[in-house]
Image (spheres, grey):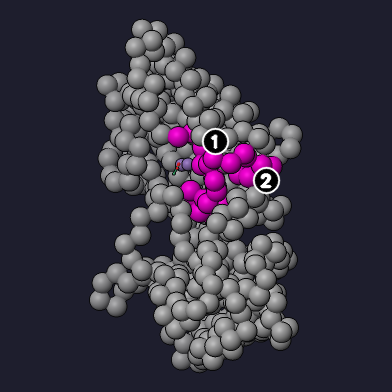
Amino acid sequence: MKYAQIDNKLFIENRKRFTKNLKPNSVAVFNSNDIMPTNADGTMAFRQNNDLFYLSSIDQEESILILFPDAYNKDYKEILFVRETNERIAIWEGAKLTQKEATEVSGIKTVFWLSEFERIFNTVMAEAQTVYLNSNEHLRATIEVETRDARFVKKCKDKFPLHNYERSAPLLMELRAIKSDTEVALIKQACNITKKGFLRALKFVKPGVMEYEIEAELIHEFVRNRSRGFAYGPIIASGLNSCVLHYVDNNKECKSGDILLMDVAAEYANYASDLTRCLPVNGKFTERQKQVYNAVLRVMKEATNMLRPGIILTEYNKEVGKITEKELIGLGLLTEKDIRDQNPNMPAYKKYFMHGTSHFLGLDVHDVGDFNKPVQAGMVFTCEPGIYIPAEKIGIRLENDILVTKGSPIDLMADIPLEVDEIEALMAGSVKVLV
Ligand code: GLY
Ligand code: MN
Ligand code: MN
């Protein structure tokens, strides 16, 4: 792991909050993610299961967590299973967690090697009545590959068909949506690294550079600041590509007169940040680009201010749509008649602004959380309005990460240059920003 060890109080507290919600005499089981294969003996980089990480801090494959708060044997209230390490593994793969280290990082006293799992789990199940199992219930998840959690659900139900079964995912969705101070600090750290990458890229952009060269600048800055890398596939989109919402090829030349849309951000300690900025490739926005940019910026400022406790995100999205509608009329892209004649189920603004304004942010970039329940203090959202005009090769999206508080929203990216004048001055090298 590149990140500094996180104080285990975070994970101890998370387990407390989770187990409070369990029915009496329940056991909950969490599995790590698999290491995904590529071809031959190749594998993808390991990425831990976020629920297991949230409850344990264990960032290693083949790990299992059992939580059994009512266990008769108090050593079995929290049990961690990790892959047995040995000298051969240490030489070929690097050292894995020892049992003592697993205790230190997680705050869990009882740690066994994975080979002990069946034996211990049988004794736990003999005592437990209800079993909470985990699954990825994210609204937008499309899952073709069976996860370790999914395989475990099948195995467990097959072997213990008479227990009561419950889902952990809804409980975790509620808990993870509200960030503790430590989590906000980790997201802020990811934002700080993103800022460094952005400022580096800003100095590098000029006519003739390739989108992938900008990607290389960013990853360099992210990794040297203890990030594993991009929090999601980077979108570095010049000219017409700026109107392609999920453009990821990043393989075109940046041309003078074009807009460059960069939706790029770093992760830190598995926590995501999520930033979008738009630059003029030649350092100076055209009048029209500036008009569209400032229209989106006004929407962003209004929308950010709306992110307060009590709002419902689905309603908020509609409100932001209405604000954008006014800007689109101002830009001459829609008329009052278009609005009068519009189909209420497919408002006219959607031609130029076709995505939502905000999503939860945390361990996942599109983090877990309920869009239909009132927003609460401690939630972190992106705010990312946009206007896309393919006919003019102008796509503008601006995105910052916002912490909801009991008072005014706190912009975790407030120190990343955003105003047109700031961007132009920085690209001209006439001012410097401290990092
Ligand atoms: N970068 C992904 C998003 O903005 O939602
Ligand atoms: Mn983004
Ligand atoms: Mn986003």
Ligand 3 within 8 angstroms of badge 1 C-beta: no
Mark yes or no: residue 39 visible.
Answer: yes
Which of pointers 1 and 2 indicates the residue nearer the eye?
1
* Residue 423: image location, x then y, percent: 51, 29
Q: How many marks?
A: 2
Residue for point 48% across, 81% down: 160
Name the residue that disc number 1 marks.
Answer: 313
Q: Residue furthest left?
A: 40
Left or right of 41: which side holds 420? Answer: right
Q: Which residues are magenta?
A: 356-380
Residue for point 29% across, 78% down: 41
Taking depth in this image into account, of 15 and 285 the one nearest to the observer is 15
**Mark 1 or 2 closer to N-term?**
1
Name the residue that disc number 2 marks.
Answer: 378
* Residue 162: image location, x then y, percent: 50, 79
Using a 10 Å C-alpha cutoff, classify the residue at mark 1 as few (fewer than 14 neighbours), some (14 to 19) or many (20 or more).
many
Q: What label does residue 126 carry, if any?
A: none
* Residue 332: image location, x then y, percent: 37, 10
Secondary structure beneath disc 1? helix
Q: Quadrant of the N terminus?
A: bottom right
* Amino acid carrying mark 1 in the image: Leu
Residue for point 62% across, 84% down: 127
Magenta-span inclusion, residue 376: yes
Q: Main secondary structure of the magenta part?
A: loop
Taking depth in this image into account, of 270 and 67 the one nearest to the observer is 67
* Residue 316: image location, x then y, percent: 54, 30
Using a 10 Å C-alpha cutoff, classify the residue at mark 2 as few (fewer than 14 neighbours), some (14 to 19) or many (20 or more).
many
Magenta-span inclusion, residue 188: no
For the residues labelled 1 and 2, the Cα–Cα distance comes to 15 Å
* Amino acid carrying mark 2 in the image: Gly
Taking depth in this image into account, of 260 and 376 the one nearest to the observer is 376
